[in-house]
Amino acid sequence: MNKEWLICNSSVPIKYNLTRSEDLIDDLFENYEVLSWFGRLCDRVSDRDLGNIHGSHDYRYENIIGKCFILGLNASIPRFDKRIKFFINFLENHINQSGDKTLTFGLMYQYLDYETILACYLPFLGYHSEDCILYITHKRINILYNFTRLGKYDIYRSDLSYPGVKREWKPYIVDPVLYEDGNIALPSIHDLILFSGMYSFLDEDSKDRIETIVNWIFGGDYGKIHGNLYYYVPLDPSYKAKSINSKVILPVLDCGKTDKGELPRLIFLCFILSHFKSALRSEWFLSAVKYLSQYKTITGRYIFPSNLIMEQTDSYVTSGRHMNVGEFKNCKNYFEIISTYWMEKIAVNCRESKEIDI
């Protein structure tokens, strides 16, 4: 019912996302948001720009490609596919290089930025069968599984001196064993985005490994890991210590008490996690559904407050601050359309999993 209502009332990007009708493609590229974000992608390809991968600015690759996914662009659209091949070709060349493997922040960024982050949205965009995407996916699955299967949460090594490191960081430096070759063994949101897009194309063994990884995030002691950021000290650092990535942040949710600082990421996070059975079985996900259900209307549609579905300049897509799907904000049904669309995406995954029905 909600799908039909959305098709009748939404702008072209949502219509295209829901129907994948080729008749809508020309209209799709007349939408103001599609033109804006596709233009950013075209500029990067024209300039052969492989810098500025990770970060909150709108010119960063992860935000451009994340918005392209949200807006419905994909491999079946020739003008989009033509640009994405630039990044696919880079990934193919990158994973076949055997450069300097000295453990530095540079090496860690190569694996994070030029593998995980560069690849993470591509399965959603239709590139799940590319050799480089398969390689990176299985590499990350195996690295993360080998740690998370142990069920350990004591990830710090505070007994080392760490000369020059800020005193307040010293108790929270990640054990060097967990990144000794430059590959980080702690799951990030970018790993989960990669796995969620690949999930339906993987064999059962790989799916089971992913479920073990996701289950670790919902383990009893995960919430006791300090703060949100992970701090690292390679053996030959460019800095004394720094954060490269963060833990997967699960907002505290209660209909009367919420973690308002992390609330904007809730919808996007629920969408990503809804691909995994371990997440759907968790108490946290049930709390999230309960929290979101308070915004369900008598029509069966949803109207979320603006902080749950914001569109904010220079902010991470992964933090849920780029949730518009090509709708004009002066549309009288804007909040109802965007809210219902995202909730429908989450509900579809829940129904397909047969774990929970929304």
Image (cartoon, rainbow, N blue to C red):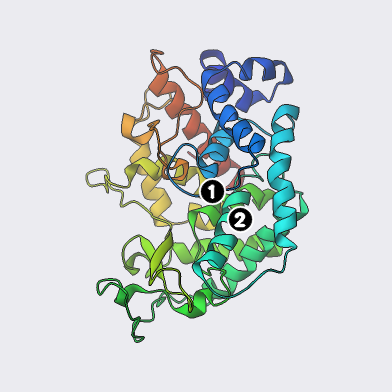
Q: In which quarter of the view is residue 102 placed? A: bottom right
Q: Are marks 2 and 1 in contact (CB under 8 Å)?
A: yes
On the question of residue 66 being in view, the answer is yes
Q: Position of residue 228 (x, y in %)?
A: 35, 60
Q: Residue at x 61, y 27 (%)?
A: 17
Q: Nearer the viewer, residue 196 or 28?
A: 28
Note whether residue 126 is visible. Answer: no
Neighbours of disc 2 within 10 Å: few (<14), some (14-19), many (20+): many
- Rendered position, 179 above or below 211: below
Residue named by callout 2: 114
The residue located at (32%, 67%) in the rendering is 226
Q: Position of residue 247 (x, y in %)?
A: 42, 60
Front residue of 93/318: it is: 93
The answer to which of 100 and 177 lies nearer the viewer is 100
With 185 as the anchor, is 80 left or right in this view? right
Mark 2 vs mark 1, CA separation in Å: 8 Å
Q: Residue at x 40, y 40 (%)?
A: 315
Vertically, is 16 above or below 270?
A: above
- Please tell me which of labels 2 and 1 falls first in the chain: 1
Q: Which mark is residue 231?
A: none
Residue 77 rendering spot, x and y as whole percentages? 73, 28
Which element type, helix, strand or loop, lies under badge 2?
helix
Q: Position of residue 12 (x, y in %)?
A: 58, 18
Which residue is farthest left? 256
Q: Amino acid at mark 2?
A: Tyr
Residue neighbourhood size for the residue with mark 1, other residues' Cα within 10 Å, grouped as few (<14), some (14–19), many (≥20): many
Quarter of the picture holding the N terminus: top right
Q: Amino acid at mark 1?
A: Ile
Label for residue 53? 1
Question: Could you tell me which secondary element the residue under label 1 belongs to?
Answer: loop
